[in-house]
Image: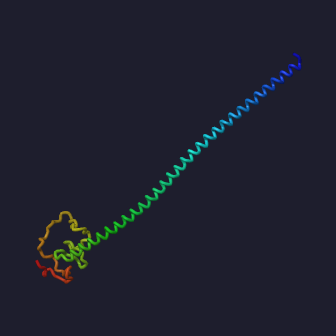
Amino acid sequence: MNTIGWIVLIVVIVVVVVGIVIVASTVGRRRKQEADRQRATELREQASRDELAARDREAKSARAAADAKQAEVEAERLRREADERERAAAAAREEQQAKLSRADEVDPDVETDRHGNRVVADGAVDDTRRGDVPPPRPAGEATTAAPATAAPAHDAPRIDGITGQERRPEDRQL
């Protein structure tokens, strides 16, 4: 082989090697691009799933906020209802106390002051009365009840609840 033959052979080998490198890099680039496309598709699908999950969380959050608002409205309604019932109970209690006071005014056997308040044995006004339960007695105090037909222990005039006329204990009919 002569020198020209060697040069041609070297040039051919270099051209073949360069061609192989170019083909290999092109194929590698295409593989990488295809892999990148696949990865991008996967990321988009994941983002789509994440968006649905985010929308679901937002919807749940909105429902929770609406439930909380509804609970606040319901709590306010219940507070108002409780206040109204408390006012009604207080009015019923006042009416009950007024009826008891009126019964004390009419009953000739019950001592009352000039305002219609029940007076206990020592002359003090009984302001603890609730219902028909008598006030508590101090410890050690004897409990002697007067007979139902006994005359009242006072001589103060009373106003008849039906006729509105004044009456005295001695005028009481048995």
Q: Nearer the viewer, residue 147 or 91?
A: 91
List the single residue furthest toward the right: 3
Left or right for 62, reference 123: right
- The residue at the point 21 percent across, 65 percent down is 138
Q: How many marks?
A: 0
| Vertical position of residue 1 compared to residue 159: above or below | above
Q: Quadrant of the N terminus?
A: top right
Residue lying at 25% horizontally and 68% vertically, measured from the top left: 130
Q: Quadrant of residue 120?
A: bottom left
Look at 76% across and 28% down and name the residue there: 21
Query: Observer-nearest residue: 60 or 169?
Result: 60
Judging depth in this view, the residue of 31 and 72 nearest the camera is 31
Outermost residue toward the bottom in this view: 165
Relative height, residue 97 to residue 171 (above, below): above
**Residue 52 left/right relative to 168:** right
The percent position of residue 152, horizontal first and vertical second, equals: 15, 76
Residue 111 placement, left or right of 52 = left
Q: Where on the picture, by quarter, is residue 155? A: bottom left
Task: Please state the horizontal and vertical placement of residue 5, each as a whole percent of the image.
Answer: 87, 19
Q: Quick one: quadrant of the C terminus?
A: bottom left
Residue pushed farthest top?
1
Q: Position of residue 99 (x, y in %)?
A: 24, 73
Residue 131: percent from left, percent from top: 24, 68
Residue drawn at 68 percent across, 37 percent down = 33
Position above or below: 63 against 49:
below
Occupied quadrant, residue 172: bottom left
